[in-house]
Image (cartoon, rainbow, N blue to C red):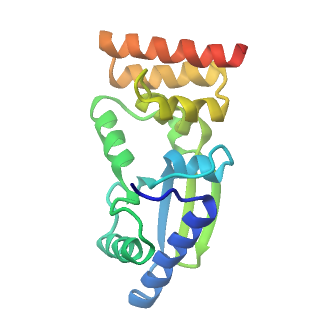
Amino acid sequence: MTEQMSKAAIVKNLSLVADWLRAKYPGRCYELEVAGGAALAFLGCKSATIDVDVLRPRALPAEVQEAARIVARAQGLGSAWLSTGVANVVALVETNSTLPAYFADTTVILEVAPNLILRIVGRQTLISLKLLAASPTERKHIADLKSLAATSDELKVAREFVLAFDSSTPRQEDLALVLVELEASHAG
């Protein structure tokens, strides 16, 4: 199993990526927009995660991928510790609809190094992506939503996002179960 990374470990590993990039490609700058568990760690809602989910750019530049592989080997990380999986999901969403305006929001901007800037997605984007991934059997996403203490209004906006992507009956049923549990956690 892949090791969990704390916020400090994420910064350390990304700093190593930045160091390698600076040595190999001086003068180039990179920017990553991060969602998922890493975003939750930066917002203080989660203590650790196994990966850094990159929303943008959609495809990591080849040199960033190479640096991530080198850091993975050196630090004992999983091969997908720096992943664009969430970007791929969002690309699928965009085939059916336009992303909501709130997807342009950023909550935190961190200069990992002079050549590497990290942007943490906005709160509503994070809630919407977590609700998209949540189902009665995907407990970690429900736990993440609970740690965010998403409000009823935020969950309503997220529900609209999810249903714009998939309004099938099974998805609506799963979503209803997840939302009932989340609403109950607010009451209790």
Q: Work out which residue is located at the far right of the displayed protein and give it.
A: 188
Residue 187 in which image quadrant = top right
- Observer-nearest of 169 and 136: 136
Q: Is residue 106 visible?
A: no
Residue 160, placed above or below residue 118:
above
Residue 23, placed above or below residue 94:
below
User: Is residue 115 shown left or right of residue 69?
Assistant: right
Q: Is residue 143 visible?
A: yes
- Observer-nearest of 144 and 58: 144
Residue 73 in the image, given as x and y percentages of width and height: 36, 75
Residue 127 in the image, given as x and y percentages of width and height: 55, 33
* Quadrant of image for the C terminus: top right
Residue 98, placed above or below residue 1:
above
Residue 144 in which image quadrant = top right
Q: Which residue sits at x=32%, y=21%?
A: 166
Residue 42 in the image, given as x and y percentages of width and height: 63, 53
Residue 164 in the image, given as x and y percentages of width and height: 38, 22
Q: Which residue sits at x=51%, y=25%?
A: 158
Q: Which residue sits at x=66%, y=48%?
A: 43
* Quadrant of image for the N terminus: bottom left
Residue 154 in which image quadrant = top right
